[in-house]
Image: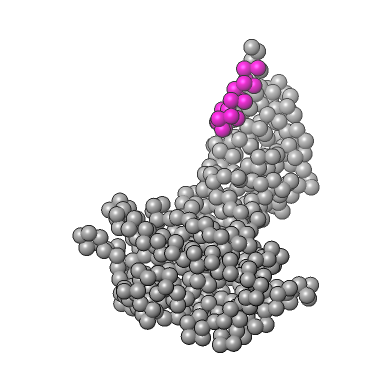
């Protein structure tokens, strides 16, 4: 069991998480439970189930989930496992026009999870049995919440409601908490050979910008950035010099309706713990879901969103393509860093690292939060 | 080729093609025939097959089939 006592110390004396949190399978499993299942983790985008009946199977840390949009347009997440023999219900993305039918013995579930039929369960042609109580055998629904089009789940079911846990950020970014518009040309994925946390740690801070993103130096200098630090909630960075992308004829994306002057030249980038990276600008937002696929494998799913339906349509095809290319290049520039830190974590004598008291505050807050979650998990296990 | 061999081929083809409507057609027709012959268990087996595929595909015939199964105390 790793020693986390130095991780939760104040920034100027703290150490980062020990190597085991990036390289050790047993520690990865502990984090799955205490960090990712115990909190509100992102598993997908609502845009991926745009229509009623759309169903998208998701493997979240080995746990089979099924994200659906029900008949009322509500996004729900169920455990993708039949209550009968534990068969996987939906294996591929599909539109379900009626019920979810288990491919094994054809138990049928509504999109709301209700068990609708149990064919031949009482013998041939007899679909009822006194001991098969349908109202007790619906699909297991996993608590879920959609924010900024990201679908979050709390697998343990024990976290406080999402709106409560993330009330501060929801209030801070209320001006962007509006319908978002997406075009499928504005999504891409990056696979990195790195533990998922390293992508968070890199995203949180602006310290690396002059070196890893030299193209930003002239338009968005280090001194133009500020830290976002909300202990035990989120952390990140902001910029005071956001400049709207302009097309050849000077066209720009439309702004979010009613967005205040503060955002004329500001943008903010937040790691919403545990595994979502968000960015907001006057005219677009983005979300990056970090999907841990193993202790040293992560898939980064990126989606860009716009403020009006028009911005997601043909009129803005060119500008959207330029914007998507810009962000993809920025995020690709970070890959060698997170993969390099992953390799560096195999150095036996690396001690978690020494933080810059001036520049690494947001990253330290993430370490502190992870350590806190793990300590809570250990305390619960000890008292169980 | 007998009628049942032909229907069996149609069922297999419908399964291969994911053609739920045809499965409902065939199972419902055979179920109704068994019902007319008062072979209730066989009828309800076949109608259950039709019912499940109708439910799965959102086929409106699910409602009428459900009614029959329920009248024979085979469905809730």
Q: Residue at x 64, y 12 (%)?
A: B1
Front residue of B12/B75: it is B12
Residue A344 seen in render: yes
Q: Which residues are magenta?
A: B5-22
Q: Residue at x 64, y 15 (%)?
A: B3
Would residue A126 appear left or right of A15 to someone viewing this image?
right
Question: Can you give x and y, in whole percent of width and height, for residue B76 in the image?
Answer: 69, 43
**In the picture, residue A318 is in which quadrant?**
bottom left
Q: Main secondary structure of the magenta part?
A: helix
Residue A153 seen in render: no
In this rendering, the answer to whether A66 lies above or below B10 is: below
In this rendering, the answer to whether A148 lies above or below A124 is: below
Question: Can you give x and y, in whole percent of width and height, for residue A125 in the image?
Answer: 73, 33
Question: Can you give x and y, in whole percent of width and height, for residue A88 in the image?
Answer: 66, 46
**In the picture, residue A41 is in which quadrant?**
bottom right
- Number of numbered discs: 0
Q: Tell whether position B13 is magenta.
A: yes
**In the picture, residue B54 is in which quadrant?**
top right
In this rendering, the answer to whether A224 lies above or below A326 is: below
Front residue of A126/A333: it is A333
Question: Can you give x and y, in whole percent of width and height, for residue A48 in the image?
Answer: 48, 52
Q: Residue at x 41, y 76 (%)?
A: A238
Q: Tell whether position B47 is magenta.
A: no
Front residue of A123/A25: it is A25
Give the position of the N terminus of chain A as an image quadrant: bottom right
In this rendering, the answer to whether A88 lies above or below A31 is: above
């Amino acid at each position: 069991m790793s020693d986390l006592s130095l991780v939760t110390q104040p920034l100027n004396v703290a150490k980062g998480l020990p190597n085991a949190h990036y390289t050790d399978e047993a520690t990865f499993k502990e984090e799955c439970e205490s960090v990712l299942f115990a909190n509100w983790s992102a598993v997908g985008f609502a845009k991926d189930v745009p229509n009623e009946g759309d169903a998208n199977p998701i493997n979240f840390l080995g746990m089979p989930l099924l994200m659906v949009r029900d008949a009322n347009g509500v996004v729900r997440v169920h455990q993708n496992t039949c209550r009968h023999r534990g068969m996987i219900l939906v294996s591929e993305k599909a539109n379900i026009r009626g019920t979810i039918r288990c491919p094994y013995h054809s138990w049928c579930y509504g999109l709301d999870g209700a068990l609708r039929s149990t064919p031949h369960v009482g013998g041939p042609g007899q679909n009822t049995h006194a001991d098969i109580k349908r109202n007790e055998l619906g699909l297991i629904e996993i608590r879920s919440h959609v924010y900024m089009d990201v679908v979050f789940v709390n697998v343990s079911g024990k976290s406080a409601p999402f709106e409560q846990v993330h009330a501060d950020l929801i209030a801070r970014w209320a001006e962007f908490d509006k319908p978002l518009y997406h075009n499928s040309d504005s999504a891409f994925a990056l696979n990195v050979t790195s533990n998922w946390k390293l992508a968070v740690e890199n995203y949180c801070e602006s310290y690396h910008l002059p070196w890893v993103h030299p193209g930003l130096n002239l338009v968005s200098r280090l001194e133009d950035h500020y830290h976002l630090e909300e202990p035990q909630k989120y952390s990140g960075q902001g910029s005071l010099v956001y400049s709207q992308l302009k097309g050849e004829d000077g066209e720009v994306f439309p702004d979010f309706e009613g967005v205040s002057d503060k955002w004329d030249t500001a943008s903010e980038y937040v790691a919403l713990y545990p595994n979502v990276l968000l960015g907001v600008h006057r005219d677009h937002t983005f979300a990056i879901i970090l999907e841990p696929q193993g202790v040293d494998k992560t898939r980064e799913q990126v989606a860009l969103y716009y403020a009006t339906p028009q911005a997601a349509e043909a009129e803005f095809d060119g500008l959207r393509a330029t914007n998507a290319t810009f962000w993809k290049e920025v995020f690709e520039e970070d890959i060698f860093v997170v993969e390099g830190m992953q390799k560096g974590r195999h150095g036996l004598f690396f001690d978690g690292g020494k933080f810059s008291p001036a520049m690494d505050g947001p990253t330290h807050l993430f370490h502190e939060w992870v350590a806190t979650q793990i300590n809570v998990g250990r305390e619960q296990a000890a008292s169980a | 080729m007998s009628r049942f061999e032909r229907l069996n081929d149609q069922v297999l083809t419908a399964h291969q093609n994911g053609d739920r409507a045809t499965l409902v057609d065939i199972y419902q027709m055979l179920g109704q025939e068994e019902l007319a012959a008062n072979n209730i268990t066989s009828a309800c087996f076949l109608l259950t097959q039709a019912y499940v595929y109708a439910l799965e595909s959102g086929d409106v015939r699910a409602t009428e089939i459900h009614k029959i199964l329920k009248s024979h105390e085979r469905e809730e």
